Amino acid sequence: MDVHAANAETLFLLPLLAGTYFFLRGKRGAVAAGICLGLAALVKQQAGMQLPILLGAAWLERDRRERIAMLCAGFAVPWLAALIGLAAAGSLAEFFYWTFSVNGYYIANGNTLGSSLRLAVAALRLMFGFAPGAWLVGTARLAHEVVRAEARRPLVVLWALGSLLPIALGGRFFPHYFLQLFPPLVLLASAAAVDAWERLGRWHWRLAGAAAASTLVLAPAASMAAFRDAEALSVPHAMPSARQVAAYVREHSSPAARVIFWGYGSALYYLSERRPATRFPYVTYLVGAVEGTPSWWSPFHPSKPLEIARAWDLFFEDLERHPPALFIDTAEAGYFGFYKFPPARYPRLQAYLDAHYRRSDVAGFPVWSREP
């Protein structure tokens, strides 16, 4: 359920790594390093954690003042360009609201400590199963460098420990968050492997070490067999009923039509090859279903206080601008566990559907078709 083909982490890691590489070139690469980190943070704010990590590493250098000033100046360049462009487009206030205010809401309404710990353990088990060598050897090397000053590389240690902060924000521990930790983890594991290789002087010991390392690298292949099964990978985003309702949408609407999948249905827009009629490809902000928390699935956890009233106003503005040809309710079908939030729970929305649409059912999904 969390193995994405692409996400913000996969997109920001390239400029983040480029920025760290330029930083390692010394003062002459500091401005370029800052620019790259600024671009990474524009993709997702969590990437901005790399700036204080590099600032901490720069503080240990003799030319710390110049390097820190150049790093911060470079970081400011893409952000200033973005802010000027947003101001020119008249979208600056919206940018601050959705980027900072709503993200503050998202972090503040995270999980309790107990739930967070359970999610962290589950995510780490999954991550360890994918790459046991990196996790086992990398974390051992991290502990070694923290304890032994002569073996310590400050940047790598700061990088590994600093990356844990954005991963832990909100206590959700989605597996894709851990991608931010993998670069320093791989560097740590590589250093440990090189050190071990140099210590294994005789060829037969080196052969045994290579065999053990190969086992650690190749062992996950057997446990990942399910990830080559197209049907297993389709759950829950593209299970048979979801593909069936998507086919119905393709057959009963024009390619230019706008539709709404009420729920967490961004994958259904892709399967149906239709554009959403609203700016919200999933409606979590409207109903207070905060991802990764009990407000989504627990009937005992209130979601009403977490609704964003502004999102409802924008949603109905979108409906006026692009009246959807079809409105598909994924809550009644329980798609992606969204059963708590049927349209009937929201009188304004249900009144809109009753006034303009007629209901039918397709593969367990209520489908509301616009009256001619």
Image: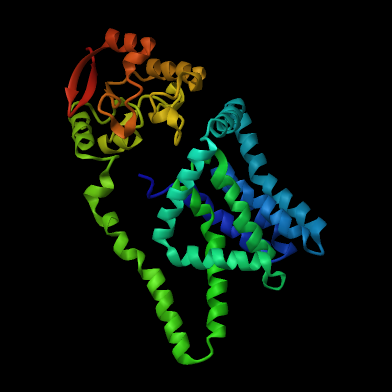
Q: Position of residue 237 (x, y in %)?
A: 30, 39
In the rendered structure, the answer to whether residue 64 lies left or right of residue 40 reads right
- Residue pictured at 57% horizontal, 49% vertical: 40
Choose top left, top right, bottom left or bottom right for residue 30. bottom right
Residues 146 and 40: in front is: 146
Residue 346: where, in percent of width, then height?
Answer: 37, 14
Q: Relative to 334, is 34 above or below?
A: below
Task: Report if residue 138 is visible in the image.
Answer: yes
Lateral position of residue 308 relative to residue 280, left or right: right
Is residue 58 shown left or right of residue 20? right
Question: 121 or 220: which is nearer to us?
Answer: 121
Quarter placement of the N terminus = top left
Residue at x-position 46% and y-position 30%:
290
Report which quarter residue 191 is drawn in.
Answer: bottom right
Q: Position of residue 5 (x, y in %)?
A: 37, 50
Find residue 47 and report its horizontal and vertical position in percent.
58, 48
Q: Does the image show residue 22? A: no
Colour setting: rainbow
Residue lying at the far front in this picture: please name it.
114
**Marker count (numbered):** 0
Between 347 and 127, the residue placed more toward the observer is 127
Q: Quadrant of residue 343?
A: top left
Residue at the image position 69 percent from the left and 45 percent from the top? 76
Task: Give the position of the C terminus as an image quadrant.
Answer: top left
Horizontal side of 79 relative to 201 (left or right) equals right
